[in-house]
Image (tube, rainbow, N blue to C red):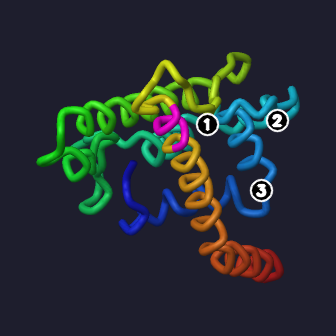
Amino acid sequence: MSDNKTPIKKDVALLIRDTFLDNEELLKAMRAVALGLNPTEVQKSLVATAMANDELYGEVKQRLLPSLEYDYSIGQIGHPWAGVQSMIYGQTADTISQSVGYKQISIELTQKALELFRNPDGEINVDPTPSEDDPFQIKLLGMLQYMEHIETQLSFLYAIAENHRETKEQLSKKQKKDNTQ
């Protein structure tokens, strides 16, 4: 829903690193909760505990469902509806309806996933089965876009953490050195 090419503030990168580095289990648990993959109680607890950190939750929310805020750095602003204009400009009414409809479903599912990250006892229904009652397959497209979006953003969190691995190791070495002096 927003691109991954924008710079990220150092404090945000460090928060993400400290949470997700060598913690792929948390990312998998988040995926299980977000995609309704029958997460275990342990996985639900892992997600809820991590997302109890308001700062982390805010960054994850901004990554999954960006909002327009004044104080975001240049290049960081986004909006869930960004990009729709290229899908609908000059298109037929059916194409516009399909594009807007499936984007709306994707946004609603993302909102639900964010709620579940804080309270994972609810459920989300992500069933990308085509339906005869939906000739334009709006539900199918929305769910597929949502699943791809969740996976992309979780991968982005993983990449941020991995990209800052050296920094964490350097900090650890520096702390050890300081403690011996």
Q: Nearer the viewer, residue 80 or 114?
A: 80
Crowding at mark 3 (Cα within 10 Å: few <14, some 14-19, many 20+):
some
Q: Would residue 2 appear left or right of 18 to someone viewing this image?
A: left
Camera-side mark, 1 or 3 = 3
| Mark 1: secondary structure | loop
Q: Residue at x 78, y 62 (%)?
A: 22
Q: Nearer the viewer, residue 37 or 33?
A: 37
Q: Residue at x 76, y 34 (%)?
A: 37
Q: Position of residue 91 (x, y in %)?
A: 17, 45
Q: Residue at x 61, y 36 (%)?
A: 53
Q: Which residue is mark 1?
A: 53
Q: Which residue is mark 2?
A: 43
| Mark 3: secondary structure | helix
Amino acid type of the residue that numbered disc 1 sits on in the rendered structure? Asn
Q: Which residue is mark 3?
A: 24
| Mark 2: secondary structure | helix
The stretch of residues the image draws in magenta is 140-144
Say which quarter of the image contains residue 99.
top left
Quick check: 95 above or below 153?
above
Q: CA distance from mark 1 to mark 2?
A: 17 Å
Amino acid type of the residue that numbered disc 2 sits on in the rendered structure? Gln
Q: Is residue 142 magenta?
A: yes
Say which quarter of the image contains residue 170.
bottom right
Crowding at mark 1 (Cα within 10 Å: few <14, some 14-19, many 20+):
few
Q: CA distance from mark 1 to mark 3?
A: 18 Å
Amino acid type of the residue that numbered disc 3 sits on in the rendered structure? Glu
Count of numbered labels shown in the rendering: 3
Earlier along the polypeptide chain: callout 1 or callout 2?
Answer: 2
Crowding at mark 2 (Cα within 10 Å: few <14, some 14-19, many 20+):
many
Quick check: 107 above or below 17?
above
Q: CA distance from mark 3 to mark 2?
A: 12 Å
